[in-house]
Image (cartoon, rainbow, N blue to C red):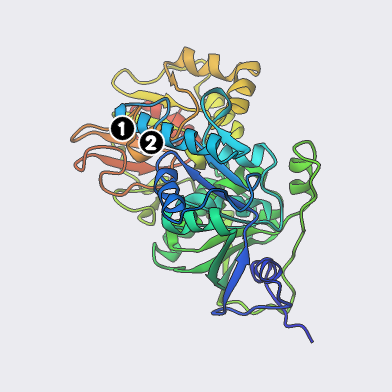
Amino acid sequence: MTPQMTITEKILASHAGQDSVSPGDLIEVNVDLALANDITAPLAIGVVKELGANRVFDPEKIALVADHFVPNKDIESARQAKTMKEFARGYNIKHYFESGESGIEHVILPEKGLVLPGDLVIGADSHTCTYGALGAFSAGVGSTDLGIIMVTGRIWLKVPATIKLVYEGHLRPWVEGKDLILFTLGRLGTAGAVYKALEFSGELIKRLSMDQRFTMANMAVECGAKNGIFEPDDITHAYLEHLTDRKGSFYYSDKGAVYDQVVNINVNEIEPQVAIPHSPDNVRPISEVDPVRLDQVFIGSCTNGRSEDLRVAAGILKGRSVARDTRLIVIPGSPLIYKQAIREGVLEILLDAGAVIGPPTCGPCLGGHMGVLAEGEKGLSTSNRNFRGRMGHPKSEVYLASPAIAAASAVLGRIGAPEEL
């Protein structure tokens, strides 16, 4: 009799060619998509060349995305991008993205139909876990491992135990997926799920849009998780319908599956959440956060740079202005999102309010460019990390929140909620 398994275990078993797997098993799996960006790809490319490989395992199963320091901010970032481009051309990599067709890797790859339910995706970026929103197993690795994958198409993995997160109830006004994952991080802690799978479930989860699911899966790694995952459903089907003709494999956890732990979360009383410096798990409800004056607000990143996020921000900023001493930076996650925002009038609203709109890039999220914080400055960001020095000077401070809180705070010039407007 086949053991009862979680969705994560089923995907891993299928890619290992086994009937079943259990937490702790060490397995070798086939990779459906390997990805890297302009920071991590050059290191992986070095490994490929050290191995003397004159071809990759499958030029259609590798994605290379210039997104962290683009448009190139200096000579070194230009060199990195050039290295990746030359490799992509020399090894006939089909899915190479730069300039006008590029954007934040974890935003554009789902948009382009390159990730499907049941896929196994490995990327040289910690937020590769984002694709779990589609019902895929996706996880980040180091560039050395990624280089070996590009040659072999395989990787050894330890099967993670799964923590089942069950969300029930109804969302309060202005509470979004970002608030749910911040609340969860506050409960689990940054080391609360080390090398575990987070399975997002419950009646509330079934009502969340794909944009909200991407946000939650994106931050699974912030509590140490190997992957975060949602069971695919009608909302997943609808999202994928016009993106690709490929068919994914829709897996679901067995009713008798064994979990490391089950965490029940009643969302009825959850307020908008804010992560205080200097950790994503240092979380408080907005009502308990001091009205800290802000030098900068950033809306974007692979966490919250999608269409819904920009619409929420525009809804709050319409007819209002950004506070005089606060700068608001908004960066759409992809050219598609950028164009949607133009067509819908979202960018005009944001510009009228005083926002600066940047081209699709990671930019400020990692303290890269287009919004680096100076010594002593305080910023509020919709991104995923607020470690010391993450967005600039080690003596700057970063607060994390949803696009709704970010937009309201930009108008107020301090941390605050939409109700205050």
- Residue at (67%, 48%) from the top-left corner? 115
The reply to whether residue 172 is visible in this rendering is no
Above or below residue 72? Residue 217 is below
Quarter of the image where one finds residue 409: top left
Quarter of the image where one finds residue 121: bottom right
Residue 24: which disc?
none
User: In the image, what residue type sits under mark 2?
Assistant: Gln
- Residue at (67%, 37%) from the top-left corner? 112
Give the total of numbered labels: 2
Could you say which is closer to the camera, residue 249 or residue 286? 249
Could you say which is closer to the camera, residue 67 or residue 95? 95
Q: Tell me residue 213's x, y (percent).
A: 62, 48
Quickly name the residue at label 2: 80
Left/right of residue 269 with respect to residue 222 in the rendered view = right
Q: Residues within 10 Å of mark 1 (few under 14, many from 20)?
A: few
Image quadrant for the N terminus? bottom right
Q: Tell me residue 60's x, y (percent).
A: 66, 44
Left/right of residue 261 with respect to residue 113 in the rendered view = left
Above or below residue 173? Residue 196 is below
Quickly name the residue at label 1: 76
Element at label 2: helix
The reply to whether residue 71 is visible in this rendering is yes
Q: Tags 2 and 1 in contact by the CB under 8 Å rule? A: yes
